[in-house]
Image: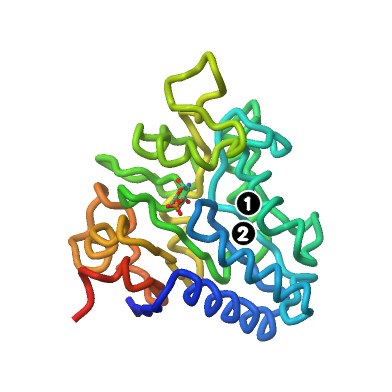
């Protein structure tokens, strides 16, 4: 695992945005895997600025997001699709037909997950997947469990993950988890790329910032491979980089 440490989350985001722009220059048909969460928001802001300055060209690229809440359509303001639209897709020159998303509202979830795997294969596989890190070590929505699932699948979200998503889920109308009467709850299930879907990407960059992720980053990089910390399986990949700010790196710095 190659580790890069930046002085601030913003410095990491800016540098990663330039790295994506370079990758697009090398391969204009780049296939990207993308995360949601608070961590990538500064990265998306930088990518939007680069695209608007014509220094990043997404016109022939394609994107596949890692996951989506079950039961939500893409136009639901709480969906990850809407989140991506707000933070990135509305601001870059990526044609809508090249944006790929799991349909959380699909009636046949198994068929939807199989469709997604086929779409990734048809696109030639993912060239670069950017990952966030759940505070419990999840990647995408592959939660800690006795066993992990290889392919894109339906998953049950842990209470901790649902709490972490309250802020993101309908940011403007978010309510506490159990307050179903005053607002909508964070969904209990999601569709997510599986561990193999992620590990089959040609290149992986995990972006983690802030002291709250520091322990988890240490276990990801230095701990044993365990399904109790899905991100630890990234150690198996031959082209994986861990991009951190100083706060997230405190336990792994020499
Ligand atoms: C969500 C997403 C993950 C993301 C994680 C971390 O649960 N499904 O893909 O990595 O949150 O979020 P944050 O960056 O807000 O800490």
Q: Give x and y (percent) for residue 112.
A: 62, 38
x 52%, y 71%: residue: 13
- Could you tell me residue 134's position as x and y percent? 38, 51
**Residue at 54%, 42% in the rendered image:** 168
The C terminus lies in which quarter of the figure? bottom left
* x, y percent for residue 185: 51, 25
Is residue 49 left or right of 171 when viewed as pictured?
right
Colour option used: rainbow
Secondary structure of the residue carrying numbered label 2 = helix
User: Where does residue 121 sit, x and y in percent of width and height?
Assistant: 61, 59
Give the spatial CA distance, label 1 vs label 2: 5 Å
Kindly indicate the quadrant of the structure image that contains residue 128. bottom right
Q: In this view, does 60 lie above or below 89?
A: below
Mark 2 sits near ligand 1, with its Cβ under 8 Å away: no
Q: Is residue 240 visible to the viewer in this orientation of the structure?
A: no
Q: Are marks 1 and 2 in contact (CB under 8 Å)?
A: yes
Image quarter in which the N terminus is found: bottom left
Q: Nearer the viewer, residue 186 or 225?
A: 186
Q: What secondary structure is marked by label 1?
A: helix
Question: Which residue is denoted by mark 1 in the rendering?
Answer: 118
| Image height of 144 relative to 109, above or below | below
Against 72, residue 223 (above or below) is below
The structure residue drawn at horizontal position 64% and vertical position 65%, both measured from the top left corner, is 45
Check residue 49 in the rendering and tell me which mark sits there, or answer none. Answer: none
Check disc 1: other Cα within 10 Å, few if <14, some if 14-19, many if 20+: few
């Amino acid at each position: 695992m190659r580790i890069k440490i930046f002085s601030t989350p913003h410095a990491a985001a800016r540098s990663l945005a330039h790295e994506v722009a370079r990758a697009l220059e090398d391969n204009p048909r780049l296939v990207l895997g993308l995360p949601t969460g608070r961590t990538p928001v500064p990265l998306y802001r930088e990518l939007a600025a680069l695209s608007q300055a014509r220094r990043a060209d997404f016109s022939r690229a394609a994107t596949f997001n890692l996951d989506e809440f079950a039961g939500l359509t893409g136009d639901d303001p709480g969906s990850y699709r809407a989140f991506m639209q707000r933070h990135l897709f509305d601001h870059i020159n990526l044609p809508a037909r090249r944006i790929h998303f799991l349909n959380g509202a699909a009636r046949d979830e198994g068929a939807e997950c199989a469709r997604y795997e086929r779409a990734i294969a048809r696109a030639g596989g993912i060239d670069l997947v950017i990952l966030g890190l759940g505070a419990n070590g999840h990647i995408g929505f592959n939660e800690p469990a006795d066993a992990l699932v290889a392919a894109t699948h339906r998953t049950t979200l842990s209470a901790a993950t649902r709490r972490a998503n309250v802020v993101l889920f309908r940011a403007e109308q978010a309510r506490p988890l159990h307050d179903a009467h005053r607002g909508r709850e964070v969904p209990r299930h999601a569709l997510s790329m599986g561990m193999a879907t992620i590990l089959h990407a040609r290149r992986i960059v995990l972006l983690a910032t802030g002291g709250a992720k520091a322990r988890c980053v240490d276990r990801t990089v230095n701990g044993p491979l365990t399904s109790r910390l899905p991100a630890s399986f990234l150690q198996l990949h031959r082209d994986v980089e861990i991009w951190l700010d100083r706060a997230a790196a405190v336990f792994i710095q020499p």
